[in-house]
Amino acid sequence: DARVTQTPRHKVTEMGQEVTMRCQPILGHNTVFWYRQTMMQGLELLAYFRNRAPLDDSGMPKDRFSAEMPDATLATLKIQPSEPRDSAVYFCASGLPIRNTEAFFGQGTRLTVV
Amino acid sequence: AQTVTQSQPEMSVQEAETVTLSCTYDTSESDYYLFWYKQPPSRQMILVIRQEAYKQQNATENRFSVNFQKAAKSFSLKISDSQLGDAAMYFCAYRKRTGKLIFGQGTTLQVKP
């Protein structure tokens, strides 16, 4: 059963700490998205990768957020230092570069920064 | 800039009735794809239906159908014979030529028994 795997599912951290969220895309998918979900903003696109290269990270606060794909089986989203306003659910999704195909989502990481 | 707008934060429908969720988008592209996703309380994002902009025929998947008005840049979702399991948050999404996938703010649908 192919699925996108995100870890951790939940994370509580103190303000100022570094947070790393990980995503394993579905095998064979070469497109990866990172989204942040909040009540006020809905689903915001933070970063978009194709073949491990960032195509668009315009939605990501550059001063504290970074996203990488060290290899085709791992995508990471890092926040350093974290702030209470970063509290949200972070989703990773993967897909094929064929535009009429959907993106498949992981279960998300619920981040709480206190 | 491409944006997707869902103007109804919350909607409710009586079980077995029909409800329509609205979505509008802004784009300068002529070729693109549109999607509706469902997010139940489990948080899992599930694809409901997709529409290709070059196809004039509205997409249909069982009880779910869309009303795609390309000139008006409108893409509404109609749910017929609503069931309790349809209660969820629904997101409209636009996929542009580069593959970038942009979502609206979401509409929470309540189904009343």
Image (tube, coloured by chain):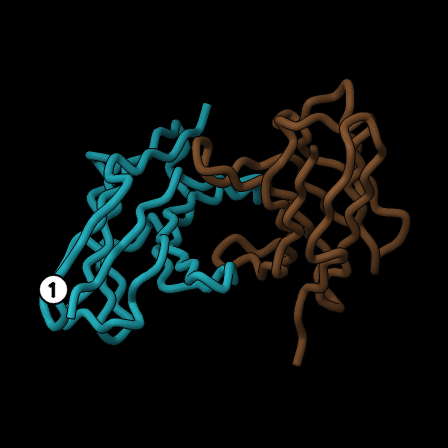
- Return the x and y of residue A64 as percentages of the image width and height: 78, 23
Specify the quadrant of the image occupied by residue B58.
Answer: bottom left
Which subunit holds the residue at mark 1? B
Q: Give the residue furthest to the bottom.
A: A1
In the depicted view, which residue is nearer to us: B13 or B25? B13
In the depicted view, which residue is nearer to us: B85 or A48? B85
At 25% from the left edge and 71% from the top edge, which residue is drawn?
B84
Q: Viewed as shown, does residue B1 lie left or right of A45?
A: left
Q: Secondary structure at mark 1?
A: strand
Q: How many marks?
A: 1
Instruction: State the brown chain.
Output: A
Query: Which class describes the residues within 10 Å of circle 1: few (<14), some (14-19), or many (20+)?
Result: some
Identify whether B66 is placed above or below A57.
Answer: below
At 28% from the left edge and 40% from the top edge, which residue is drawn?
B9
Specify the quadrant of the image occupied by residue A111.
Answer: top right
In the depicted view, which residue is nearer to us: B24 or A76? A76
- Return the x and y of residue A24 as percentages of the image width and height: 77, 60
- Residue topped by disc 1: B14
Q: Viewed as shown, does residue A57 lie left or right of A53?
A: left
At 80% from the left edge and 37% from the top edge, which residue is drawn?
A78
What's under tag 1, amino acid-wise?
Gln
- Return the x and y of residue A51 as percentages of the image width and height: 78, 49
Image quarter in which the C terminus of chain B is found: bottom left
Identify whether B56 is placed above or below B60.
Answer: above
- Return the x and y of residue B23 as percentages of the image width and height: 27, 41
Instruction: State the cyan chain.
Output: B
Q: Viewed as shown, does residue A49 lie left or right of B34?
A: right
Q: Give the residue furthest to the right.
A: A70
At 59% from the left edge and 45% from the top edge, which residue is drawn?
A89
